[in-house]
Image (spheres, grey):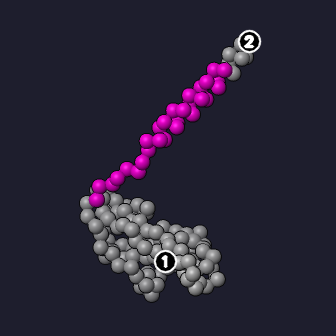
């Protein structure tokens, strides 16, 4: 009889934890970050990427990456989406702005269009942007 009471209390506790977790999770949404200003950037070609950054990108290209690199006057942000089974992918920059304590940088990978001719060989889509050297952490979204 005492065992049944213990089991019932444990099940009641587990159920209560589950219900509280469900209620807490339902109201969660992404916190909006307050933009201080947009950050101007330039998408650069492979030939313009600093050698050290390019070497790191090459090492990590299969898995994907989110990298930063700075020199005396520029900050470079690089995002790679890992190995894709075909070509025909493109990357767009959704946002690049300075908030109070960080630079926020968001990109989107877009696959080949339906009916588009694509190479049936693996590709490693990436984008690298160059901007002024702002000494703030970078948040990749």
Q: In the image, what residue occupies the spot 65% across and 26% down? A: 11
Residue 104: where, in percent of width, then height?
37, 62
Q: Nearer the viewer, residue 141 or 19?
A: 19
Q: Main secondary structure of the magenta part?
A: helix
Task: Report helix, strand or loop for mark 2.
Answer: loop
Quarter of the picture containing the C terminus is bottom left
Q: Is residue 95 above or below residue 120?
A: above
Residue 35: where, in percent of width, then height?
28, 59
Q: In the image, what residue occupies the spot 35% across and 67% down? A: 96
Task: Report helix, strand or loop for mark 1.
Answer: strand
Category of crowding for the residue at label 2, using alpha-carbon neighbours closer than 10 angstroms: few (below 14), some (14–19), many (at least 20): few
Residue 71 in sight from this viewpoint: no
Q: Is residue 18 above or below residue 135?
A: above
Of all residues, the one furthest to the top in this rendering is 1
Category of crowding for the residue at label 1, using alpha-carbon neighbours closer than 10 angstroms: few (below 14), some (14–19), many (at least 20): few
Quarter of the picture containing the N terminus is top right
**Label drawn at residue 57:** none
- Say which label, 1 or 2, has the lower sequence index: 2
Q: In the image, what residue occupies the spot 59% across and 25% down? A: 13
Q: Which residues are magenta?
A: 8-35
Q: Which residue is mark 2?
A: 1
The magenta stretch spans residue 130: no
Q: Which residue is mark 1?
A: 90
Residue 6 is drawn in which quadrant? top right
Q: CA separation, marks 1 and 2?
A: 66 Å
Residue 49 in sight from this viewpoint: yes
Of all residues, the one furthest to the bottom in this rendering is 47
The magenta stretch spans residue 11: yes
Residue 10: where, in percent of width, then height?
64, 24
């Amino acid at each position: 009889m005492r065992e049944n009471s213990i089991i019932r209390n444990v099940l009641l506790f587990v159920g209560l934890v589950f219900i509280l977790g469900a209620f807490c999770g339902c109201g969660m949404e992404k916190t909006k970050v307050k933009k201080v200003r947009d950050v101007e950037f330039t998408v650069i070609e492979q030939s313009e990427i600093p050698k050290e950054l390019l070497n790191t990108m090459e090492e990590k290209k299969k898995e994907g990456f989110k990298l930063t690199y700075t020199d005396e006057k520029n900050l470079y942000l690089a995002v790679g989406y890992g190995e894709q089974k075909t070509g025909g992918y493109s990357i767009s920059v959704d946002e690049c702005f300075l908030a109070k304590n960080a630079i926020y940088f968001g990109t989107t990978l877009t696959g080949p269009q339906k009916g588009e001719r694509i190479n049936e060989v693996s590709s490693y889509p990436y984008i690298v942007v160059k901007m002024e050297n702002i000494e703030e952490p970078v948040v990749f979204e």
